Amino acid sequence: MAGKNRLIHTPEGVRDSYNAECRKKLAVQDKILNTLYLYGYEHIQTPSFEYFDIFSKDRGSVSDREMFKFFDRDNNTLVLRPDMTPAVARCVAKYFMDDDMPLRLCYLERTFKNNSSYQGRLKERAEMGAELIGDDSADGDAEMIAMVIDSLKAAGLKEFQVELGQVAFYRSLLEEAGFSEEVEEELNQLVENKNDFGVAELLKGQDIDEGLKQVFLKLPELFGSLEQIVQARKLTSSPKALAAIERLEQVHAILQSYGLADYVSYDLGMLSKYHYYTGIIFKAYTYGTGDYIVTGGRYDKLLVQFGKDTPAVGFAIVVDQVMAALSRQQIDTPVTLVNTVILYEAPARDNAIRLGRYFKEKGLAVQSMKRRQDKSLEDYRDMTLGRHMRNLLYLKDDGRVVTAMDMVNGSADEIPIEAYE
């Protein structure tokens, strides 16, 4: 790609959006935002770039390699925001340090991750989400799941599933096993990838209790309905593991009150690359996309790193994945696009402006344009058709008569300008 042509292409991992596609995305975002507002969440915006330390490995956010890094004039390392949760946590610690009541915040922002190209994910993504700060209850957990479900329904999706897990269950097993950091990291990778054989192979060389080993080996089977998850009680006597299962039961009961329990399945082997999660974690999936459309969970120990010791739970909806799913499932998002062109000769300008105002006052979009001398009326007809618009209103001479052309049926009517008053 050389010369001027290179300038019109986007870098790998980002894309343009325009016309109907863009309007539909905005409409879906509005529907989701309205759902979050109805749950009482207030909007927050954070900067597109922040200090590197906000998202460092210690915070449990994305890896150093996945960040877009650069320097300011004072040589501070800055990064394009890869993850909204630490950014919101920083904000809450700064502006709500002494507020000990529950705080509900939501956002619509872009995140930037320097993913490998083979992953097929966009490097710049539109994400919408909500964070409930200062509430450590099962009710707060269930509210998050309910909002995810209602948001996806508002976006137009009908068939989707929320998979709900509990990292506290898995971490209690790790704590009991006492693995080295290297073994723990390898095991995490194997469990996350559902690599049963790899888990079995790794555990062969570990000196741990046989019963505990069996729990690790059965992790891939601990998914499905809540009844299947509850069976895990028989596998462990760890108080933390049992408390994690009990928490899922509480959340399930509350979701039944919402009437939304059927949208949820359970998976005790679910892990997340975000290491700040401490309790429930969840992902939502639907047809037509190979990746999750929502991710979230409880992160009770993240805000304390910014100086405010308070629990929190939240989620992020990946808007681009939702749009891909809607498109592949052939679910239309109705939007009102511009449908009419007002074309006028120079002497008809005043009447063209009056006509344009007439339509705008009625809430109808129009494009007004003065006719160029080097363009024929046929050129403007072709333009109207090519841009998928239906009506061309032509004002010649002084514009007292409007030639109304319907591009669909090919008709043309002469209408006095007074008819539009």
Image: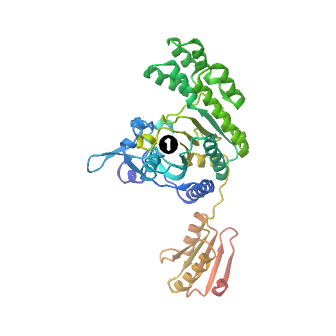
Q: Please rate how many residues cluster around mark 1, counting C-alpha atoms within 10 Å: few if below 14, some from 14 to 19, many from 20.
A: many
In the displayed structure, would residue 347 be above or below residue 204? below
Quarter holding the C terminus is bottom right
In the displayed structure image, the side of residue 251 where residue 320 appears, left or right: left
In the displayed structure image, the side of residue 306 where residue 131 appears, left or right: right
In this view, the residue in front, 248 or 206, is 248
In the displayed structure image, the side of residue 128 where residue 96 appears, left or right: left
Q: Secondary structure at mark 1?
A: loop
In this view, the residue in front, 118 or 200, is 200
* Count of numbered circles on the image: 1
The residue singled out by tag 1 in the image is 310
The spot of residue 204 in percent (x, y) is 53, 12
The spot of residue 336 in percent (x, y) is 63, 64
Q: Would residue 67 be visible to someone looking at this image?
A: yes
Q: Residue at x 46, y 46 (%)?
A: 89
Q: Would residue 193 be visible to someone looking at this image?
A: no
In this view, the residue in front, 238 or 57, is 238
Task: Give the residue type at disc 1.
Answer: Thr
In the displayed structure, would residue 185 be above or below residue 210? below
Q: Residue at x 26, y 51 (%)?
A: 73
